[in-house]
Structures are given as C-alpha cells and as structure tokens.
Amino acid sequence: MLSKNKIKYIRSLELKKTRKEERVFVAEGHKLVGDLLGHFPCRLLVAIPAWLEKNPKVQADEIIEVTPDELTRASLQKTPQEVLAVFEQPTWMYDVASVSKSLCLALDDIQDPGNLGTIIRLADWFGIEHIICSQGTVDVYNPKTIQATMGALARVKLHYCHLPSLIASLGDVPVYGTFLDGENMYGKTLTDHGLIVMGNEGNGIGEEVARLVNERLYIPNYPPQRETSESLNVAVATAVICAEFRRRTVSAG
C-alpha cells in the first residue's frame, strides 16, 4: 500500500527545488525504469504486482507493491505505466580535454524539456557522451525531460556551467554553431572532435556565446529558392547536424 505521505513525496519531485534538495529524479514506465536500473541507485520503486512478478530480482532501497489506482495517484504522467522509480542524481565529472578528443554538444538556454530529452536521446544515438549546458537551460531531471530521453541518460552525461567561460577556455578547438548567415554545412570541412553549439528555441545562440563560435554553419533548405519555414526545431536541427558530422567520420574512415 502506498501511503499519502509517499504519494505527496513523489509528486513533490515534479518541482526542481525539491529534486535539487533531495538529489533525486523520477522515471516512469517499464522500459525507461528498466534501462536506468543498474546505472543509478534506486531509492524507491513503486510497481503493480504484474511488473514485480516479471522482475523478481529488481534492487531498490524500498519496493512497494501498489494497485493501478494507487500508481495513478502517485504518477506524474497522464498515463501511468506499471512502474515508477525514484533514482539518485549522479555526480558527473567533466574534463575540458574531452572536447579536443571527441565531439561534444553545448546547449545555450534550451527551454523545452521535451527538446532537451530528445537531444540527449540523439546524442546517445550518434555516440556523443557529453552535453554541456548553459545555466539557463532547462533542468535535465525535469520529469518530461527524463521521459523523452528514453533511457539515454544512462550513457550521456550532462554538465551545467557558465557556457561562455568554458568555450573561451578551449583555445583553438573547433566550436561550431548554426546561424542563418552561416556557411552551408555540406560544403564545410567538419572535424571528428570539437563542440557543436545549439541555441535557444526562439532566439538561437546568444550574443555572448555567438562571439566565441569559430565555425558558423547553416543548414540549407531545399530547393534554395523555395519559400519555406523560418527555421527548424532545435532537436531536429541537432539531428541533421550530428548525422552529417558522423557521416563525414564514417566516410573518412
């Protein structure tokens, strides 16, 4: 049975302040919870009997068997899915030298939790292990972000910092950014290492960060003369750019 206090505790984790104080986050659904178990310590696991029967060896500090109705009352989702878990937030260390050895992403004030979650999932798909976020970027542990990652958080590490300061410390490392007045990326030389900066959904890359970008890219529409949408969704743009960088790497190999 799930007590009122436990339900209140779980639902309080919808707030960033509480998540930060408790150093935890919530994940829901058999696939997402299954992907994260074993990667992050699980403080609390709440599940219906059928899920627990299928997963008898699951490990958590506390496991509570609940009815579907109890799960619905505790869930942060519109449609609860068998299991809910509260995981400890990891402490990820970041070495600036990673940018000179591999391809990394930087996010400048991304606001939509779904966009952030999708970008994390894309980074996982394209083998990008580090994402550097400005302090104004939405919280990675927002429940909507966690759900959108589809478990990719087990393999992609996020770091929040003062983005201009970090970029300024990179020296001659390639720093790519997308701009409407940039150069067609299909005609540019792209490296297998460096930093790809993606900007805010409405305003793009901020001025302070833009001044530090040394490789300005443009994703061309097709055909060039055709009237089209003003811009791409930031997650879609990230997918297009990462795919091209990885295509070049494969071709060069």
Image (tube, rainbow, N blue to C red):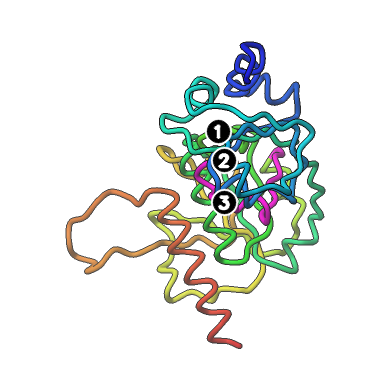
Place of residue 167 in the rendered image (x, y in percent of width and height, measured from the top left): 69, 50
* Quadrant of res 96: bottom right
CA separation in Å, label 3 and label 1: 14 Å
| Three-letter residue code for mark 2 | Ile
- Residue drawn at the location 50% of the way across and 60% of the way down: 216
Q: In this image, 132 relative to 144: left or right? A: right
Which secondary structure lies at badge 3?
helix
The residue that label 2 is drawn on is: 146
Q: CA distance from mark 1 to mark 2?
A: 5 Å
Q: Identify the magenta region.
A: 147-162
Mark 3: which amino acid?
Ile
What residue is disc 1 on? Answer: 143
Which residue in the rendered view is the most extreme toward the left? 226
In the displayed structure, 5 sits above or below 51; it is: above
In this figure, which residue is indicated by the disc labeled 3?
A: 120
The secondary structure type at the circle numbered 2 is helix
Residue 1 or 104: which is nearer the viewer? 1
